[in-house]
Amino acid sequence: MKLIYVAMAALAGLLYVVGDAFFKMRIQNHTEVGVLDIFKFWTLPAGVALGLIVAYGLGFFGKFLSIYPLKEVDISAYAPLVVVFAILLSAVAGVFFFKEQLSAVRALGVVFAVAAIYLLTLNT
């Protein structure tokens, strides 16, 4: 797999994580917002609505970045690569920005995910 495609997968994963992190920051203090409230978009608090728009907008651009590499790369290698970058970056964001604990089991899961990507990209 070309290095530029790996970089595009990393950027797509980063966009997903930034969008989700922004949404988490916006919804953290709004315990009254439920899952079904998203369907009544106009009733959401402004900060939550903004977080939702940013999260989906960045997700759209992340998906847009995946269009070109998928013309040449197997989806069975590229899609997991994007997901692993998202897993890795969301673990880092959780620890550094949201002060979450990264247990040994979760850290081992990230290591296994990276190893799986390495195995998937052999001979491609």
Image (spheres, grey):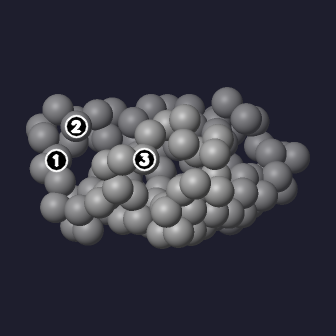
**Disc nearer the start of the sequence (3/2):** 3
Q: Is residue 48 above or below residue 91?
A: below
Residues packed near mark 2 inside 10 Å, few (<14), some (14 to 19) or many (20 plus): few
Q: Which of the pair 118/65 is nearer the observer?
A: 65
Q: Which mark is residue 102?
A: 1
Q: For this rendering, which residue is in front, 45 or 9? A: 45
Amino acid carrying mark 3 in the image: Val
Q: CA distance from mark 3 to mark 2?
A: 28 Å
Q: Position of residue 1 (x, y in %)?
A: 68, 49
Q: Residue at x 49, y 32 (%)?
A: 119
Give yes or no for contact between labels 1 and 3 (Cβ–Cβ under 8 Å).
Answer: no
The foreground one among 94 and 33 is 33
Question: How far from the left and from the top, in percent, is residue 72?
Answer: 84, 46
Q: Secondary structure at mark 2?
A: helix
Q: So how many labels did they put on this image?
A: 3
Percent coordinates x, y for residue 89 in the rendering: 39, 57
Amino acid type of the residue that numbered disc 1 sits on in the rendered structure: Leu
Q: Which residue is mark 3?
A: 33
Quarter of the figure with residue 100: bottom left
